[in-house]
Image (tube, rainbow, N blue to C red):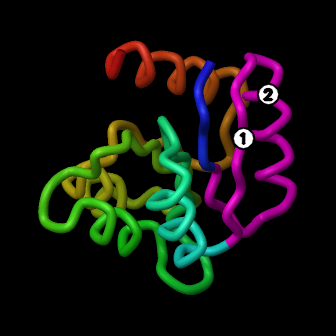
Amino acid sequence: MARILVADDDDLIVDLVRFTLEAKGHEIMVANDGDEAIDIATTEEPELIILDGMMPGSDGLQVLRRLGQGGAPSVPVIMLSARKQQQDVVGGLELGAEDYLVKPFMPEELAMRVSKVLRARA
């Protein structure tokens, strides 16, 4: 299936996302902060990034900006964040995120959104 980078500093979220997506056949890479996410995204070339909005180092919006360098990131990004204010959701989408899912979330819904984004990029 796809190589997916999960960037989140919450180990429980990472484990839940990993379990859910590996069960669907995806290969999961993990970054625990924004700077590590940028390093992995640029060296390992994931096919999709699931990105937390609030992490140590660069936050999710800063990561989106750096990956996009003025345009949308070349790798599709799904924001997965506890930030649920309208300006946060709109900000993530304006910076190029393909989708935005608010925590807490249903794992199967995340899996469906991942499938949808990957199909659209195929």
Q: Is residue 66 left or right of residue 110?
A: left
Residue located beneath label 2 in the image = 22
Disc 1/disc 2 C-alpha distance (Å): 7 Å
Residue located beneath label 1 in the image = 28
The residue shown at (37%, 39%) is 76
**Quadrant showing the N terminus:** top right
Q: Is residue 30 left or right of residue 2?
A: right
The residue shown at (60%, 35%) is 3
* Image quarter of residue 68: bottom left
Q: Are marks 1 and 2 in contact (CB under 8 Å)?
A: yes
Which kind of residue does numbered mark 2 sit on?
Answer: Glu
The residue shown at (60%, 48%) is 5
Q: Label 1 crowding class (10 Å Cα cut-off): few <14, some 14-19, many 20+?
A: some
Tell me the element at label 2.
helix
Tell me the element at label 1.
strand
Which region is colored magenta?
6-32
Which kind of residue does numbered mark 1 sit on?
Answer: Ile
